[in-house]
Amino acid sequence: MQSNRVLAGLPVPIYASPMSLPMLDLASQAGFRPSSAPCNTHMDLAEALIQHPQRTFMQRAVGDSMEGAGIFDGDLLLVDRQLAPQHGDIVVAQVNGEFTCKRYGCHDGVPSLQSENPDTSSTPIQGEIDIQIWGVVTNSVRRFRTA
């Protein structure tokens, strides 16, 4: 299925197609622990990761400001526009025309977009700053091998 959506005034194509992948009904241990034999099932990856498919888009993370939250340069972010941001959520926002990924919060009664890297600054949401929150980051996907 293909349709066009408009996000913050920009048309964004949305493609939705099921992708069922085999899934082992086991957790992968980061060490050795004997376990029982796996039970093979199938899982639709989009269904597992996306709650509102018609209101979700992907965007690539750039930079190191969210490394403390486990989001690294090049990761793919799944962003849900249906969810209203709550204190502590990670969001994608447009600040004075530039896109950013930050943690949404409120400190001393002032809402802000907070970095998860002590070397980068947070952005208070007040005054003449033009901020538009595009959505809440629900998942990130990291590639470990490129070839």
Image (cartoon, helix red, strand yellow):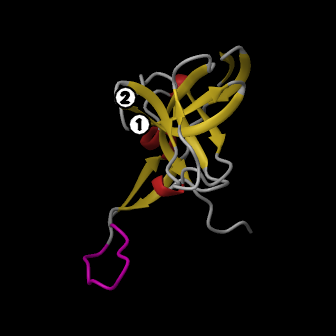
Q: Secondary structure at mark 2?
A: loop
Identify the mark at residue 16; answer none if there is no mark.
none
Instruction: Verify whether residue 28 appears in magenta.
Output: yes
Pick the residue in front: 37 or 4. Answer: 4
Identify the mark at residue 86; answer none if there is no mark.
2
> At 46% across and 27% down in the image, what residue appears?
52
Callout 2: few (<14), some (14-19), or many (20+) C-alpha neighbours within 10 Å? few
Pick the residue in front: 97 or 109. Answer: 109
> At 67% across and 33% down in the image, what residue appears?
99
- Disc 2 + disc 1, Cβ < 8 Å: yes
**Residue 72: x %, y % from top left:** 59, 56
> At 65% across and 55% down in the image, what residue appears?
73
**Residue 3: x %, y % from top left:** 68, 19
Quarter of the rendering occupied by the N terminus? top right
Asked if 8 appears above or below 62 in the picture, the reply is above
Number of numbered discs overlaid on the protein picture: 2
Pick the residue in front: 109 or 144. Answer: 109
The residue to which callout 1 is attached is: 89
Determine the image quadrant of residue 95.
top right
> At 26% across and 84% down in the image, what residue appears?
34
Asked if 108 appears above or below 63 in the picture, the reply is above
Q: Amino acid at mark 1?
A: Asp
Q: Amino acid at mark 2?
A: Gln
Q: Secondary structure at mark 1?
A: loop
Measured in 3D between alpha carbons, the distance from the residue under mark 2 to the one under mark 1, in whole angstroms, is 6 Å
Magenta residues, start to end: 27-37
Determine the image quadrant of residue 24.
bottom left
Q: On the picture, is 74 further left or further right than 46?
A: right
